Each structure stands twice: as structure tokens, then as C-alpha cells.
Image (cartoon, helix red, strand yellow):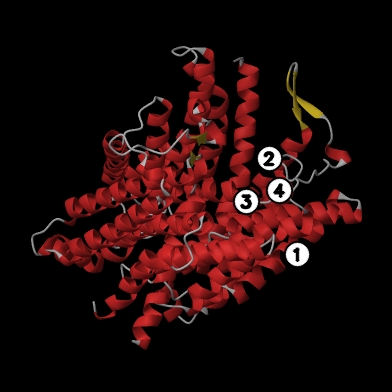
Amino acid sequence: MTTQLLLVQALNGLQLGILLFLVAAGLTLVFGVMDFINLAHGVQYMLGAYLGAALAAATGSFWLGLLLALPAALAAGLLLEVLVFRHLYARDHLAQVLATFGVILFLNEGVKVVFGAAPLQVAIPPVLEGGIEIMPGLQYPLYRVAVLVAGLATGGLLWWLVERTRIGMLVRAGATNAPMVSALGVDINRLFLLVFAFGAMLAGFAGVLAGPIFSVEPGMGDNVLILAFVVIVIGGIGSIRGAFIAALLVGLIDTLGKSLAPDLLRLVLDPSAARQAGAALASMLVYVAMAAILAFRPAGLFPVRSS
Amino acid sequence: MRQAWLPLAVLGALAAAPFLGFGGSYETTLMARAMILGMAAISLAFLVGGAGLVSLGHAASLGIGAYAVAILDAHGITDAARVLPTAVGAAAVFSLVTGAIAIRTAGVHFIMITLAFGQMAFFTASSLAAYGGDDGYTMYSRTEVMGTRLLESRLAFHYICLAALALTWALCAMLLASRFGRVLRASRENAQRVEAVGVAPYPYRLVGYTLAGALGGMAGFLLANATEFVSPATLSWQRSGELLFMVILGGAGRLWGAILGALVFVLLETWLAQQMQHWKLVFGPLLVLSVIFLRGGLAGLVARRG
């Protein structure tokens, strides 16, 4: 394990973290504002990836695909809200978990019917092909740098929207105490619709960005969803800052763990055993971190609710 | 217990089924699967409906029980007298250790932390290369009972599953009705008041959580023997979601609803899968609709009629 390899893995980890943040941001605000557990948020990420891939193939341009996929992901999110989620706000978490679980089954199967079960390949746009030298003798793929930059920019925009605008103030207030905001005359359901639609679009955006890096396939959202939940629970539910820090943390732990754990275990185990145990340990690391953090801070790192 | 006729009728129907033309290999396999998942669902209903602990990692206890059977099988240990206690014990220990941490949290955090522990068990199972890793492990034969191949008999296995199901139900119902269960139910409603009365809910919840895990382990023991195959999919979070769904479909307020939920779930899934390739396109929306419109679950529906 050289310093260069470590640097590359750290960058990959940050980039996974950024994608996780884009997914987790919508999830955490929806949860914060409406106390609504949306397991289907992961399939919205998947839907974004498929829409991006299909529209890019249809138009022949990655950029047009991206541009068209965003409103399409937004529309899909609104449709879900009207058809399903709207009927579940007043229900308990259990009902929400299960109904959105049904949505996952439907959409995972749905993309299989429309696009086939085989993974889709998405080409990197020509402008972003190749690599850039981030250190003497170390090339890093340009597309991945672009994802990192785009994700950071979007994260910055989101932070500005939530922390510095009037709408953002209402969203934050809603996440802290929804009944109070509602009593002050704010239409909490409309506020939620806004947050929800925006969150769906962010998840879709992350999906489009992920297309050329990961394979676009049915069920791709499931793992991301679980990681995003880990992120919002570690970060403190409803907190954008918490989600950002936790997302980078989870991205780094996951990526570095996967590349370092087998090597570290090789010091004490024989190579094949180290490889197997390392892979298992690496997959588990984020959950271990989450359990450890919750054991000491049951409300996460940056709790929003004061109660 | 006024509506207890329905679960008793269901158990009776399951008992009579092999003699009413449902004794074939296909039907008994299907019923065994439904009964075993029913056991796991009841133990989860005990947690969710009884103690208010919504676990999204209950499949882990099922899978640990099943893996105990597979791992002992790989080492030539196939005697039920050793396999069953190991399966139940392993699942109980896992639940005790993870529960000790998880029960400190509440609400959605509890859901997520149980999910996290379930995922840890899932990834551990996937990494067990000696026992099949991702591909799973095929057993040579079923567990022996006192040197006999009792479990190989379709009919005997059917009644063993039925007895285990009835036992699980009776045990959980008795527990909920006892003083122990009253504390659990009271702390579901208001943990602070329970504490004010001078009873700490934590040890009660932990014991309840461990018991549910042990029962899940027993279901896992039977599941491994039913399919003679064990894979990490048994521990996946989707399976935990399915178990939760069985509980809700049946009606979380009533323990026996879980039996109903598991039966309907397995039969519907199997029937739909025969009708069409993309059956989940219908199954998913059915889940959504049943959650939105079927409050109180199937058991609630029956109770309202009755």
C-alpha cells in the first residue's frame, strides 16, 4: 500500500461520500420535516440513474440526458408523493416502512421490465474522458474529479438554501418542530412537498452522476439507501451539516476499509483467510461505526431536536 | 381471546391438510415454509406488537439458527440434541449482545440500529467461504433425531413444524399475558410511567428481545432442514422487511395475526410467481394498498366482522 494508492482510495471515498450526501440530504429533510421514513428514496436514486442512461442513449448526449433526467426524476417523485406517501404521513413508522418497501419491490421490478435485468453501461462524456495528474506520476480519472466538484457545488448550494434563505429557515424550523411551524400559519404539507420533490431530484442527480462509475442495474439503490440511512442516523436526523460530515465519514470508512482491511489482516492471518475476513470486516465497518456512535450518542452527532 | 377461533381453525386446517388432498411434496413444502416463517413472524409480532420494539433485523436470528445447522453439518454433527440447542442458543446470544446496545435507543434509531446489526450478520455469513460464502451451503441430509431420520419424512416434518408454530404462539401469548408481558406492554405505551412506578423497563425488554431471537433461531433450525440449503439471503434486510410485513398484514395488535400474515404472504407470493414472471409488479402495489387500507391487518378485519 503506497501513499499514492492511499490518496486515490481517499479520493474515491470522498466521492462516494458526496454521492451519499446527495441521497441522504433529501432523506434526512423529509424525515426531519414530516417524520416520514421513506425507504423508497433509494429507488429514486436508481430511477435517476436509469433515466439518465436512457435519455443519454436516446439523445446521444450525456449532458442532454442529465438535463432531462432531473425534471423527470422530480416528476416521478411528485407522482409517488401523490399516489402513495400522502396517505402515510399520519401513520406510524411501521406503516411507512412497509408501504415504501412495497414501492421498492415495484420499482425494482419495473426497471427490470422496461430496461431488462442486465446492467446498463453509461459512457463517460467525451469532455471528461481521461485523467488529470494530481501528483507527479499519479493520474486520477477526470470524470471522478468532476463528480466530486459537482457534488460539492450542489452540497454548497443546498447548504446556502437551507441555512440562508427564508424557505430554508422554514424547512429547518419544520425539521425541529413541525406542529409549531404549522401553528404559525405555514402550510406544512406544501413545505413538505417542496422538500420531498427537491430531495427526489437530488437523489436522481446522484444516480445520473453515478451512472458512468457504477453499473446501472435493478436493486442498485438498495445498498445506497441503507448507507444513506446510516449517514442520517449518524449525522443526526434532520441535520444537513450532520448528513454532510457523516456522509464523508461513511464514504471514507467504506472505501478505505475495503482497500486496507485485507492488507492489515494479512499481518496476522494467512493471505486467503485475510482476504475473506478482510472483505467481511470492510463491509461491516460502517455498521460497526454506526452502532458505536449510537451507543454513545443515541441521537447522532448533530442532533436537531432538543427533546 | 374472543376471536381465538380463527387461529385455532387455521392450525386445525393445517393439521388436516395432508389428509385433504394437500399431502403432496409440493404442498407440504409450501406449508412448511409458511409455518416456519409464521414462527419467525410471531416472535417478531411479540416484539413489535407486544413490546413496541420494531426490529428491522429479525431475519438475522432466523439466519443464525439456519447457519448453525449448516456449520455443524459441515463438521459432521447432525444430531438434533446438539444442533437445535446450538441454533437456538446462538440466535439468543446474538440477540442478547446486540439488544443490550440497541434497546438503549428508541424509535427510528432502534429500527436503524437493528438493521445495522442485521447487516453485520449478513456480511459475516457472506464471508464464510468454508460454508459456501455468497452461494450458500447445501446440506447432505436433514438433522437426525435420536439417530433416526425422522425429519426426512414429509408428514412427520409437517407436524413438527405445526407443533413448533403452535408452541411459539402459545409461549408468546402466555408471556404477554403474564406480569412480565404487562411490563413490556406498559413500557410500549409509556416507558417513563413504568419507571415512575419503580420498574426499570430495560431488563424486561432485553429478556423479551433475547427470547424473540431464540424463537427466531428455532425457526431458522427448521428452515435449514426444510430447504436443506442455507444462504446469506436468509439474513438479508429484505427478508427482515418481509417478516415485518407479515406481522403488519396479519395485524400487529394481535399475536395470531402473524400466522395469518405469513400464510397469506407465502401463498400470495407463490401463486403470483406462478401466474407471471414479473409478479413483484403486482405484489409491491398490493403491499402498499394493504398498508394504506387494511389498518389493523387481516386480524383486525376478522375482529370487526366477528
Q: Chain of mark 3?
A: A
Q: Is residue A68 visible?
A: yes
Question: From mark 2 to mark 4, how far is it between C-alphas?
Answer: 22 Å
Chain identifier of the residue bearing label 4 in the image: A
Compared with A205, B265 (above or below) is below
Furthest residue in direction right, as rendered: A60
In this rendering, which labeled residue sits more in front, label 1 or label 4?
4
Closer-to-camera residue (B262/A184): B262
Q: Which mark is residue A217?
A: 4
Asked if residue B172 is positioned above or below residue B90 in the image, the reply reads: below
Query: At numbered mark 2, what does the secondary structure look like: helix, strand or loop?
Result: helix
Q: Earlier in the sequence, mark 2 or mark 1?
A: 1
- The reply to whether dot 3 and dot 1 touch (C-beta < 8 Å) is no
Dot placed on the residue nearer the N-terminal end, 3 or 1: 1
> Label 2: chain?
A
Q: Measuring 53% from the left and 46% from the top, which residue is drawn there?
A: A227
